[in-house]
Image: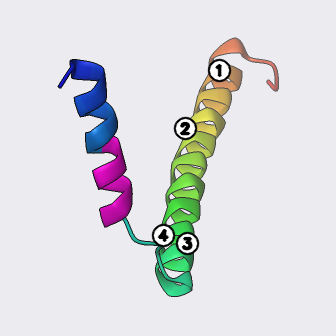
Amino acid sequence: MSLIERKISEMIQTLRLAKKTSREDYSQHLRLVVLGMLTVGGVAFVIKLIAEFVAVGTSGRFG
C-alpha cells in the first residue's frame, strides 16, 4: 500500500469514527469562545485606554 493510499484510508477511518456534536455542546463551545473573545478584547481596550491617558498626561495637552 502506498503512502497516499494509506493516508486516504486513515482519513476515511477518522471520518467514520467522528460524530456530530449535539446542539447543547455546540452552543456551550460557542458561548465559551465568545466569552474569551470579549475578555481579550476588554483587556486590550483597558490597556489602550490607560496608554492614551499616560500619553495625554506626559504631553501636557490638557494643562
**Residue located farthest toward the front when viewing the structure as drawn:** 1
The residue tagged 1 is 55
Label 4 – label 2 distance at C-alpha: 27 Å
Query: Mark 4: few, some, or many residues within 10 Å (few <14, many ≥20)?
Result: few
Tell me which residue sits at (30%, 22%) in the image: 4
Query: For residue 15: magenta?
Result: yes
Residue labelled with disc 3: 31
At 59% from the left edge and 28% from the top edge, which residue is drawn? Answer: 51
Tag 3 secondary structure: helix
As drawn, the label of residue 41 is none
Measured Cα–Cα span from mark 1 to mark 4: 39 Å
**Which residues lie in the magenta part?**
11-17
- The residue labelled by disc 2 is 47
Mark 3–mark 4 Cα distance, whole angstroms, equals 5 Å
Q: Amino acid at mark 2?
A: Ile
Q: Residue 2, how many percent across, how many down?
A: 21, 20
What's the residue at 53%, 74% (across, down)?
A: 26
Q: Horizontally, is 63 left or right of 40 in the view?
A: right
> Is disc 2 surrounded by few (<14), some (14 to 19) or many (20+) residues within 10 Å?
few
Q: Nearer the viewer, mark 3 or mark 1?
A: 3
Dot 3 or dot 2: first in sequence order is 3
The three-letter code of the residue at mark 4 reads His
Distance of mark 3 from mark 2, alpha carbons? 24 Å
Question: Which label was assigned to residue 29?
Answer: 4
- What is the x, y in percent for residue 29? 48, 69
Label 4 near label 3: C-beta < 8 Å? yes
**Observer-nearest of 17 and 49:** 17
Name the mark nearer the viewer: 1 or 4: 4
Please tell me in which quadrant of the rendered image residue 15 appears.
Answer: bottom left
- Answer yes or no: do the residues labelled 1 and 2 have beta carbons within 8 Å? no
Which amino acid type is shown beneath numbered disc 3?
Arg
Q: Nearer the viewer, mark 3 or mark 4?
A: 4
